[in-house]
Amino acid sequence: MLKMTHLQKVYRTHLIETHALRDFSIHVREGEFVAVTGPSGSGKTTFLNIAGLLEEFTGGEYQLDGVDVHGLNDDQRSRLRNEKLGFIFQGFNLIPDLNLFDNVDVPLRYRGYGAAERKKRIEDALGRVGLASRMKHYPSELSGGQQQRVAIARALAGSPRLLLADEPTGNLDSLMARGVMELLEEINRQGTTIVMVTHDPELAARAHRNVHVIDGQVTDFDSEPALRAGSRESGIGNRESVQAAPVSP
Amino acid sequence: MLTYYLQLGLRSLKRNPILTALMVVGIALGIAASMTTLTVLHLMGSNPIPWKSDKLHYVQLDNWSPDEPYSEDGRPPDQVTYRDAVALMEAGKADKQTVMFKLSLPIQPENRDLKPFQALGRVTYADFFAMFEPRFKYGHAWNRDQDASHARVVVLGKDMNEKLFGGQDSVGKSVRMDGIDYTIVGVLDEWKLRFRYYDLTNGAFVDPDEFFMPFTTAVDLKRRASGNNSCWKSPGEGWDAFLGSDCVWIQMWAQLDSPARLAEYKAFLDSYVSEQKKLGRFPRPLNNRLLDVTEWMEDQRVVSRDVEVQTGLAFAFLVVCLVNTIGLLLAKFTRKAGEIGLRRALGASRRDVFTQFLIESGVVGLSGGFLGLLLTGLGLVAVRALYSEYRTVAQLDWMMVLTTIVLAIVAALLAGLYPTWRACRVQPAAQLKV
Amino acid sequence: MEIRPILSALMRSKVSMILIGLQVALTLAIVCNALFIIGQRMDRMNRPSGMNEADTFTFGSNGFGQGYDAQAVLRSDLALLRQLPGVADATNTNTTPLSQGGWNSPINLQPRQKSATANTAFYMVDSHALGAFGLRLVAGRNFKDEEVMPMDQGDRIQPSAVIVTKPLAETLFPDSDAVGKQVYLGEDSPPSTIVGVVERMQQPWIDSSTIEYSTLIPAFMPYGNYSRYLVRTEPGRRDEVMKAVEQKLAEANSGRIIGRMRSMEQTRADAYAGDRAMAIILGTVIVALLLVTALGIVGMASFWVAQRTRQIGTRRALGATKGDILRYFQTENFVITTIGLLVGGVLAYALSLWLMQAYQAPRLPWYYVPVGFACLWLLGQLAVLGPALRASRVPPAVATRSV
């Protein structure tokens, strides 16, 4: 489903080179629920951006659902994002000026579905997250947990092959977080592959498999499935390593 | 605290130089357009002789054709006949009165270095000077006796005296006009008339009169007026027939010092016309008018419709500029929601925030005002170039400079009021959570 | 494309939309009416006077002193003028088109008619007038030399022959040829015969409601000691001939003043100075207005783009292409502009109605508003292009940035 091999990402400014990812390899298979963990600044977000085709990489290979991403132009990448990926953001990123229906509608519009198809999918998706009755409400009228459910509905509406979640519970209290997590597990059980970036070990523990990133490299992974990744493979477990360093863009 | 807000305002404006420039230029353009036209309108429409404009009355009699009115809207002719002018002057029923017409005469300077030239002057009675009050530089007006005796005297305008005598006191000297010598009794000082309100019939925005001569003396020359002449029937052959005709070509003013005197004079005019009707003249219904200076200006449309339309459009333009500024300020202040929340959390009251942002708007207004003033100056230069006859009314005076600045600040504060009010409603907590 | 969601999003930030819409509405109303006024003035200024204006000039001669014989000077001046090099033709005339001063009189089909058949301007000229003015004779003939009579001011107007303009001829004799017909110029005068018809010659007053009704009277008629001449030069030699004429005529007779030397081009410029100024001032207001409106749109759109950076990033992450984002802002601008224009269209007609009532202005022709729509749509799209392009360049990775 998602296969990165010896991936590199270097940010260059006129003064310094920053290696956000170096020799980064990971393989996520269909149906998996993988948690990518690591301290702030470790390269988690860079991984997510590249995995989500939001940023380009500077070396290595990346195949998304069998498509070699390298060399695609901006429009092709947009298309691919729209068709294959669903995003769940830490900050929900709902559009405040649109009601729930229109928010979920956004990716479907870019997909180019007809009105009837869109309506069906929106109602379906909102139904799955339990918010079908609040379609005309605006995001500001909802709790954080409900907002994240809408974001999940938005991600699901287009029937993505892969769901990318960026700290999906980071802005939620623990009760709400549990609800969202349960929803994600439910979605995964129904067959959607999920890659979740988080620094919360409790959350990561609920995934099938954890990949630990430090300093732009995959350092640990747990669970068995044959994983030809990373040059260094050491240790097992969810190492907690939260740093106070600012998040790199 | 005020200086602190002022500093904050300036710093904030400096941080977004393009947005700030857009706002300032927007206000300046709106202000300049409206102030340019307003200045012209104001100076055109202003009372030229405020201390006695209600006493000076323009005399109109309706001696026009029985078959058709002089003007479609029923206004009487704007000038009177020679017969009526003379009769009313001889009656002398007003406190002061004069009749006048415009005359062009060749001037033959004694100084052989100067070529003869044509000069436009005014033929009138001695009362003219007492009624319209030009200041004399040398000498004085002629008197009523000289009117009666057809005296060959003349009062020179300042420019004419400069030209002929280099600005020296020329009283007592003579000037030769069309082969006849006239004794100079007076020289006017600069007469700053923005427009020639005493003769609107022949164009308000024209060069000042170059000389003044007794009416009685000039009529002896048998020269026709240079101004308008209208007849509703053929005057007949020759000069005497012309003088006795119903052609109108003379303007008449009467000074009436009280409402009672005005009523008396009105009654006198009515009885005069009734008398004339018995002689077979004045075939139309009684239609005499005695408009005072401002009424007469209104009647003769001294402020042209074009200027009114321009002023209207300019103010509509100002409204657009203000709407523009409101939008931009709103944009600017909305972006500062975070800062406002922080300030509120740190103890700023709504009132503090309100003052801070209103001062920022005020700074924009003040800058817009100064730039607008500059542009108004340029605008007036352009108006003077476009309408050469408006050069006396396209001038900025202190009153208008002050108005411009005040208008700009008020406009900017008005424009800033809504955005500021919105900014104040920011809840201190709302913006702080990440 | 996606107008409904854009519209519902706009309804959530009404104030900004109202501000831009209001600006567009006022701009449309003002621009339409101002353009219409400009158009009217241009039409007025473009009316042909019927005479050659490029190669002609006028001047006056003012004699002074006793014993000045204006009639004799008039004849000798004309003789002198006609033989000057560069002069194509010359005539005496009391006035010219565009000069704003002249003689207006009724012209009748019967003696002592109660109300006039028409009102006409008189041009007192000699037999060289057609050549000097450059008029086009469309029927009949020119004046004969012997028809030109000496006249003095105050004399009765009773010429044996007159030439009228075609519009006047058609008004006087709608059903037949005017040449050879008789007209009455004064209540006690004998009739005059129309000997010729010229295609066009405007009256001297540009505001006259009967501007095309002119009559040429064959007369040597000084005004006291004053006489006025019109000279047509060979093409391109006007300025040079003007100087020569001033000098030669002054030399020929020192007992007079040669003055008011003006080319017809100058006379036209003076006559229409007010209209031209009005057109320029309104034109400036229009340009400034469009500029301010465009800048306003740029400012607001930039602000919206900055405010919605994250939203744009999210849309990009959800699969919007750069083109989708560009079109989003363009469509949004189109929606706002259209709402403003709809209001502005009503305002434009309302303003026109007010101008009609207050200033007797003619009605705004319907097509000004749709043309204004098109222009402002274009202006809006151009103004929003910069900010919209900036929006399209927002990277999708913005979506994952923590605040």
Image (cartoon, rainbow, N blue to C red):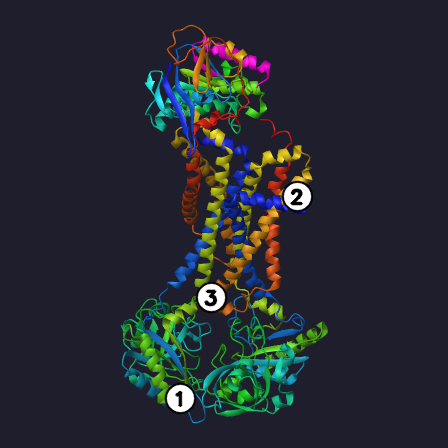
To which residue does mark 2 refer?
B355
Kindly report which numbered mark, 2 or 1, lies closer to the viewer in this rendering: 2
A194 lies left or right of B98: left
Q: Secondary structure at mark 3?
A: helix
- Percent from the top left, x then y, of residue B406? 62, 55
How would you classify the magenta stretch by its main secondary structure? helix
- Percent from the top left, x then y, of residue B40? 55, 63
- Percent from the top left, x then y, of residue B424? 64, 37
Kindly report which numbered mark, 2 or 3, lies closer to the viewer in this rendering: 2
Which span of residues is magenta-colored?
Answer: A172-197
Give the position of the N terminus of chain B as an image quadrant: top right
Residue B386 counted in the magenta span: no
To which residue does mark 1 refer?
C70
- As displayed, is residue A4 above or below residue B381? above
Q: Nearer the viewer, residue B260 or A75?
A: A75
- Specify the quadrant of the image occupied by residue B141: bottom right
- As displayed, is residue B13 above or below residue C76? above
Tag 3: amino acid: Ala
Residue A186 counted in the magenta span: yes
Q: Nearer the viewer, residue B386 or A182?
A: A182
Give the position of the C terminus of chain B as an image quadrant: top right
Protein chain holding label 2: B
Dot 2: within a 10 Å radius of its alpha carbon, few (fewer than 14), some, or many (20 or more) residues?
Answer: some
Q: Are marks 2 and 3 in contact (CB under 8 Å)?
A: no
Tag 2: amino acid: Thr
Q: Nearer the viewer, residue C125 or C311?
A: C311
Dot 1: within a 10 Å radius of its alpha carbon, few (fewer than 14), some, or many (20 or more) residues?
Answer: many
Protein chain holding label 1: C
Q: Secondary structure at mark 2?
A: helix
Q: Nearer the viewer, residue A235 or C232?
A: A235
